[in-house]
Amino acid sequence: MARKEMPTGLYTSVSQVKCWLRCPRQFELRYVRGVAPEFLPVNLAFGTAVHEALAAHYCEIKASGTPLRRDLMLDVFRFAWERARDGKVPLQGDEDEEVDVHALTDKGVTMLHSFAEHAAKAPPFEVVAVEHPFTVPLHDPDTGEILEEALVGFIDLIIVEKGQRMVVEHKTAARKYGADQLDHDLQMTGYKIAARSAGMGEVGLRFQILVKTKVPTVQVADIERTAQDEDDFLRTAGGVLKAIDGGVSYPIRGWQCRGCPYHHACGRVAR
Ligand code: SF4
């Protein structure tokens, strides 16, 4: 799959906003100073490989009307996972835990079998786009001021199901998403704003989560975002951008340090 290109000019993404909120020091090291990560978090690499397999599945439906053969979808996963394992940056789990790449290969294959069985029972739908790029202006909801930075990103999947256009976000997770994650995830709010701005009207929002339990399952959750959620998203993004412009940076030490690829540089930031 082609490498995703970012547009030129000033922009931010939901991932950048979430990174700053998680730890402004990590944001500074990664996006401002361009520090090379010491490792690639294994869950991130694994999730990316699963994403590629799902994208291939839906690209084939878009092109031919039928899903990609299951063995080919598994090959896409294996190839992407192998590429991550053989990459220049080593994989690492939280707290230096040993990465069992073979067990994870088996886990990915089992998860994708479970996904294929789930997908075979899905109601009819049309694939509109896979990995759909967007660039939308951001504004301050209180003053109407248009911000310099645009919001950019990629929507995993857009389908039409029962006449309703749906934005679908794929995730891999250790356990099912709870109500708080479903209700407050910023990414979906950003996608809703992006879809409307791109002329798609009022879209439905769906998480399709491949859960890495012993017997993998697929959690499908259709969620809502209100006008208040959208305004809150714009306030959060605008606030983070103001803080970044002002050079605000400080460490937030906690659970996020365990899997932080910038830990090696964190204590050595010259102020
Ligand atoms: S080690 Fe912790 S405090 Fe330092 S950058 Fe990483 S997440 Fe932030």
Image (tube, rainbow, N blue to C red):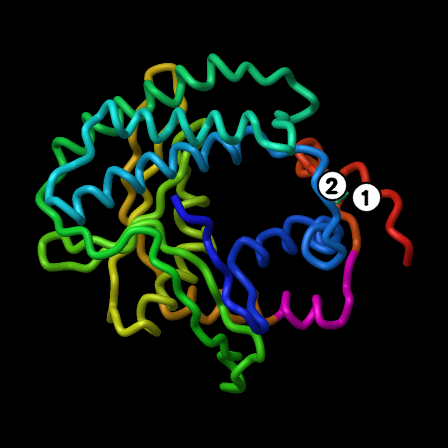
Asked whether residue 64 is drawn in magenta, I would say no
- Taking the spot 56% from the left edge, 64% from the top edge, the residue there is 12
Residue type pointed to by label 1:
Cys
Mark 2 element type: loop
Q: Is mark 2 within 8 Å of ligand 1?
A: yes
Residue placed under numbered mark 1 in the picture:
266
Q: Quadrant of the N terminus?
A: top left
Residue type pointed to by label 2:
Tyr
Residue placed under numbered mark 2 in the picture:
262
The number of callouts visible is 2
Mark 1 element type: helix
Q: Residues within 10 Å of mark 2 (few under 14, many from 20)?
A: many
Q: Is mark 1 within 8 Å of ligand 1?
A: yes
Q: Residues within 10 Å of mark 1 (few under 14, many from 20)?
A: some
- Taking the spot 40% from the left edge, 42% from the top edge, the residue there is 179
Range of residues picked out in magenta: 239-249
Q: Quadrant of ligand 1?
A: top right
- Taking the spot 45% from the left edge, 59% from the top edge, the residue there is 153
The one of 240 and 59 positioned closer to us in this rendering: 59
- Taking the spot 81% from the left edge, 42% from the top edge, the residue there is 265
Q: Is residue 252 left or right of residue 222?
A: right
Residue 147 image-quadrant placement = bottom right
Residue 256 image label = none
Q: Is residue 136 above or below residue 265?
A: below
CB under 8 Å between discs 1 and 2: yes
> Residue 142: horizontal and vertical position, in percent?
52, 82
Q: Is residue 72 left or right of residue 183?
A: left
What is the distance, in whole Å, between disc 1 and disc 2 at their CAs? 6 Å
